[in-house]
Amino acid sequence: MAQDQIRNPQSAIRNRTIRHFALHRIGPVELRVISDIEAGVIALTEVEEEVLRRYSSQPDWPHRVVSLFVLSDMSPLQRQLTRTAKLPPGGVAALAYRPVVNVYDLADSTACHIFINQTAMIKEGYWDDPLAQTALLAHEHGHPLAENATVRASRELALALGLSYREPLSTTDEAAWRDKLRRLLEVLTDKLTLYAPREIFTNDLVLRSEFTDALYHLDMINVRNAARAVQSRPALVAGLMAEPALTGTGRAAFLALADLKAHLDLALEIASFHRLDRAAQVRSLEQVLEATVFPALVPETAPAYRALIERYQTLTPDMTSEALAGFARQVVTVLADALRPYGVDLGASIVGRARSGDRPER
């Protein structure tokens, strides 16, 4: 996320009580720690210092000042975003659920701002887990180092979805239900297509920088969280069945999309273990998926996951906009194949993104 899309990163907690402030020197880096909470900040700062020690020794490390904001939630950051900000999939609302965000400016690489969301960290089981924190911070700090031609091309493109339905989704308000399904699908397709290179090349770098154990540990937490989450799926099914406005086609379509949306992003996390031939970690992670997650979902989820892994292995760091658009169309085809049995016909055109004057975002 670009720094110029926030009016003033340092003022993000202006109306919060600052309970912790500290300055640290880690090699060439000045680390500034600002927090509106007390417990756990020192331990988290120690994790950040270790990540900075490893990265700052690399010749292409860009930052001289790192500001670490440890916040009870992300509302201060959300309020500071400019109206023209180009955000990751899910927009401003999704920031509330992100455990860590790196705000940096590609036009001025001397500084970055790391925002840590205590509420999200606790919910996901990361807050008291130094190894998971190491992976999260290594990933966020890896984004500027992982910039390449393909990532830059991803910022110049946008998806325009084409949707049609073979049967009505609703018996009362068809337009509203179609709009809801479209909005959910837009978030999913954006994440798995044009946003994917940023995540995958960053995870590649994390593994090459000897954070393999940490990233594997974090991803195993996420896979096991997914296994626990499927236990609540019957409640989702019951909720859809109890919705009188939906047709049978509508219920099936929304359930299939919910399964895909909740679980296919695990391909973004695991793809780099495939790409860098970390076979042992791949086996362990995917054994959990195959045994405890995919059997509980619509049957198209597992083939879609495997197809995404195959597509993600074709990403190279030197792709043009045209080549990346072709990759994105292949990913859309994977999603289209998964949704077709539920009466949803998905297509997409890849268009150039209108320039707003903002610098590239995170």
Image: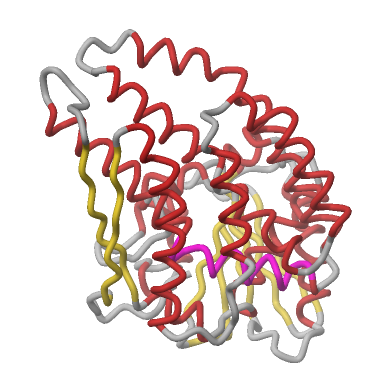
**In the image shown, does 143 or 46 lie closer to the viewer?**
143
Measured as percent of width and height from the top left, residue 287 is found at 79, 39
Q: Say left or right for 35 vs 241.
A: right
> Measuring 72% from the left and 49% from the top, which residue is drawn there?
41
Q: The N terminus is located in which quarter?
A: bottom left
Span shown in magenta:
193-207
Q: Say left or right for 16 vs 270.
A: left
Majority secondary structure of magenta residues: helix
**In the image shown, does 187 or 141 lie closer to the viewer?**
187
> Measuring 65% from the left and 54% from the top, which residue is drawn there?
269
Question: Can residue 97 be found in the magenta stretch?
Answer: no
> Measuring 78% from the left and 39% from the top, which residue is drawn there?
128
Note whether 94 is above or below 242 in the view shown. below
Q: Say left or right for 151 vs 143.
A: left
Q: Say left or right for 249 vs 78.
A: left
> Measuring 54% from the left and 69% from the top, which residue is drawn there?
198
